Image: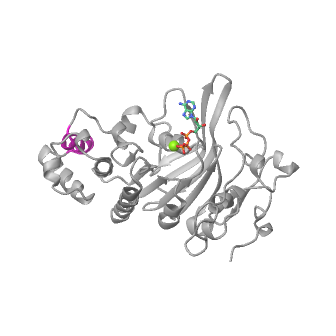
Amino acid sequence: MTEPLLTVRNLKLDIPVASGTLHAVRGIDFELNRGETLCIVGESGSGKSLTSLALMGLLGKRILRKADQMTFDGTELTTMSAKELRKLRGGRMSMIFQEPMTSLNPAYTIGDQLMEALLLHQPVGRAAARARAIELLEKVGITAAESRLGQYPHQLSGGLRQRVMIAMALMCGPELIIADEPTTALDVTIQAQILRLLVDLTREMNMAMILITHDLGVVARVADKVAVMYAGELVETGPAADIFATPCHPYTRGLLRCIPLPGKTERGSELGTIPGIVPSLVGEVEGCVFRTRCDYAEAACREAIPHRTNGAHRFRCIHPDGMRHAEEVPA
Ligand SMILES: Nc1ncnc2c1ncn2[C@@H]1O[C@H](COP(=O)(O)OP(=O)(O)OP(=O)(O)O)[C@@H](O)[C@H]1O
Ligand SMILES: [Mg+2]
């Protein structure tokens, strides 16, 4: 078997806060092969964005990162110098953020920013960089691409700006792209288009992608692998087909009950919601992080929770199949 493009082992992210240490990410493991799409899902505050920033080496100074292993194509990321990391970032791995205005510089033209992305990382001249910028703007569906090069970010609509961001992230032909809720700032009608474009391009260019999204419908359509995050832990990970067919962790099953399924959910019927709130992440959490909201919680859930594996499908629960058998299987 070839080595995964990305391997993360026991990644922990701690943030000192007034009341102690906030353990925002608590020892997560995952891997990603070339060309694969991993979707990270989980409710707000579960640590999805911090995880992606940790991979890109873009965490704020206050945040302490520890990992047994965090390798990209065999190279350890945690011990890389700032210079090496800059070279990797925007070159072999790049990121698309939620809000394009925070990543595009208002003072420079679209053309200059796109070209700079390439000139910084590859030994090419300005003419070649300009040609590549036009090629990618066309690829992301922007018409009259050449005339857009001289425009500034504020002259473009939100949807166009996000297309430019995607073009910029692709300038160097990265092997890994991390997209953190790349469309939530856009109109609903445009969201689907942009996401489709991103997914098509990653496939066409054989890039691996980590896609963070709240939209489980999107996950069902595009993910090869799914990682379900809750309160800083990965409670369940595995091939997307397994997660959707036999979700094991009670939290995953709660999430899946929240999506309307075509043909199964009656119009107007209530979607599932998970009662309760996420526990405080300050200090250590004993036992299962989900137990305060779990229908099947019992005394043993306060103890250490085993990691259960079934091939590539992993989850953490004291119950061998997460009490899956206890639930009615929808027809
Ligand atoms: N700079 C910071 N200082 C203090 N706490 C932080 C900081 N950054 C993140 N956190 C906390 O770390 C936790 C994880 O944050 P993160 O942004 O990764 O969540 P998320 O899963 O991306 O949520 P969302 O879906 O809302 O984007 C949250 O509890 C958040 O409040
Ligand atoms: Mg986030």
Q: Residue at x 59, y 65 (%)?
A: 268
Q: Position of residue 56 (x, y in %)?
A: 44, 41
Quadrant showing the C terminus = bottom right
The quadrant where residue 278 appears? top right
Q: Foreground residue, 322 or 9?
A: 322
Dominant secondary-structure state across the stretch colored magenta: helix
The quadrant where residue 58 appears? top left
Residue 303 visible within the image: no
Residue 132 vertical position relative to residue 22 in the rendered view, above or below: below
Q: Foreground residue, 172 or 220?
A: 220
Q: Residue furthest front?
A: 268
Q: Position of residue 23 (x, y in %)?
A: 65, 35
Residue 222 vertical position relative to residue 21 in the rendered view, above or below: below
Q: Residue furthest bottom?
A: 331
Q: Residue at x 34, y 44 (%)?
A: 90
Q: Foreground residue, 214 or 240?
A: 214
Q: Is residue 163 left or right of residue 264?
A: left
Q: Position of residue 273 (x, y in %)?
A: 66, 55
Q: Is residue 192 left or right of residue 115?
A: right
Q: Residue furthest top?
A: 18
Residue 272 visible within the image: yes
Magenta stretch?
109-123
Q: Residue at x 28, y 35 (%)?
A: 105
Does the segment drawn in magenta span residue 331? no
Q: Position of residue 172 (x, y in %)?
A: 29, 50
Does the segment drawn in magenta span residue 120? yes
